[in-house]
Amino acid sequence: MKGTVLGIEGTAWNLSAAIVNEQDVIAEVSDMYRPPTGGIHPREAAQHHAKYASYVVKGVLEEAKKKGVDASKIDAISFSQGPGLGACLRTVATAARMLAITLDVPLVGVNHCLAHVEVGRWKTPATDPVTLYVSGANSQVLAYRMGRYRVFGETLDIGLGNAFDKFARNAGLGHPGGPQIEQFAKGASKYIPLPYVVKGMDLSFSGLSTAATEALKNNSMKDVCYSYQETAFAMVVEVTERALAHTGKNEVLLAGGVGANMRLREMLDIMCTERGASFYVPEKRFMGDNGAMIAYLGLLMYDSGNILDIENSHVNPNFRPDDVDVTWLPKDFEERRETCI
């Protein structure tokens, strides 16, 4: 693999630009949209991204130049093509097109979910893992099989991060909800039974969130947060364990912003230890949405010849990871892995 790629992330909250090569992240600059109250407002988030796009791009180019990498050394521009909020995606795609035209370099459209997986593989020893990807809008269990990352289980309604945020708003806690829930859970004295909704290999969190809100009427915040967290995490760990057994793989990778939760890491680590599997988590800066992951997957795709014409660079708010042909892994990737086991 060779080359230097500038990537732009902007699917929801975080607007981030990064420049990477095969060795490491050369530079990264971010600016997060923070609403005055409540959750994300797509139109306002897009306006934020439009306002600060030139700031983050200029900033990352300046930082890279200090390290000896100027604009003339950039080989391609990558951007989040989806999934995400349509208005935000369109804003970032416009910025990426303008950069590609200005620098006269190829354009690469990146699947946001797979960027989380690939940056995790890059920044940990994981080779061919089952990935539990849990963020605000997305909750999926993914694994590579026959040329694509297959979805072995996913949420049927809302992502785990958004479910935590929904509960936190109803409970009068701060945003984001996940860290607040994690802190309250540490002081709990008992577990309160809540709906455990696993349907085959899929998950549902909306009913669990509603039940947790109702439980606050007769129970302490600490006990409800603990019970909500334990139930939700047990659900995702169960589906991850099933996928591990089904695929015969021996690695688990945790990806996405919810993965910063230490109790979730502990539960996955216990499961992997019991199954004789290795458990990997990248450092926190690569867990939430970030420009480095978009730039890195862009580098992989660029190096494998997977680029876009400007006229075909439309965004896709419902872009599924299992719709992507994985051109950046060798054809005999699975055979190589099985030989090494």
Image (cartoon, rainbow, N blue to C red):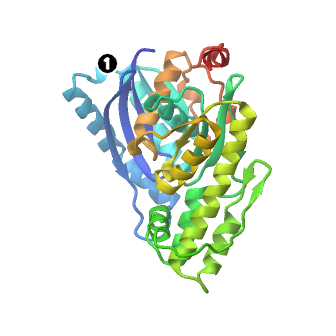
- Where is residue 157? Give x, y as percent: 70, 58
Q: Residue at x 46, y 74 (%)?
A: 173
Q: Residue at x 74, y 50 (%)?
A: 202
Density class for disc 1 (Cα within 10 Å; few <14, some 14-19, many ≥20) is few
Q: How many numbered circles does the render carry?
A: 1
Q: What residue type is disc 1 on?
A: Lys
Q: Residue at x 46, y 23 (%)?
A: 299
> 279 and 80: which one is in front?
279
In the figure, 103 relative to 268: above or below? Answer: above
- Where is residue 296? Give x, y as percent: 45, 28
In the rendered structure, the answer to whether residue 252 lies left or right of residue 122 reads right
> Could one spot residue 11 in this view of the protein?
yes
Q: Quadrant of residue 109?
A: top right
In the rendered structure, the answer to whether residue 120 lies left or right of residue 53 reads right
Q: Residue at x 61, y 86 (%)?
A: 218
User: Which quarter of the rendered picture does the N terminus lie within?
Assistant: top left
Residue closest to the far right: 200
In the figure, 304 relative to 230: above or below? Answer: above
- Where is residue 142? Give x, y as percent: 65, 38
Q: Which residue is mark 1?
A: 73
> Could one spot residue 319 in this view of the protein?
no
> 18 and 236: which one is in front?
236
Helix, strand or loop status at disc 1: helix
Residue closest to the far left: 66
User: Which quarter of the rendered picture does the C terminus lie within?
Assistant: top right
In the rendered structure, the answer to whether residue 168 lies left or right of residue 156 reads left
In the figure, 169 relative to 326: above or below? Answer: below
Residue closest to the far bottom: 218
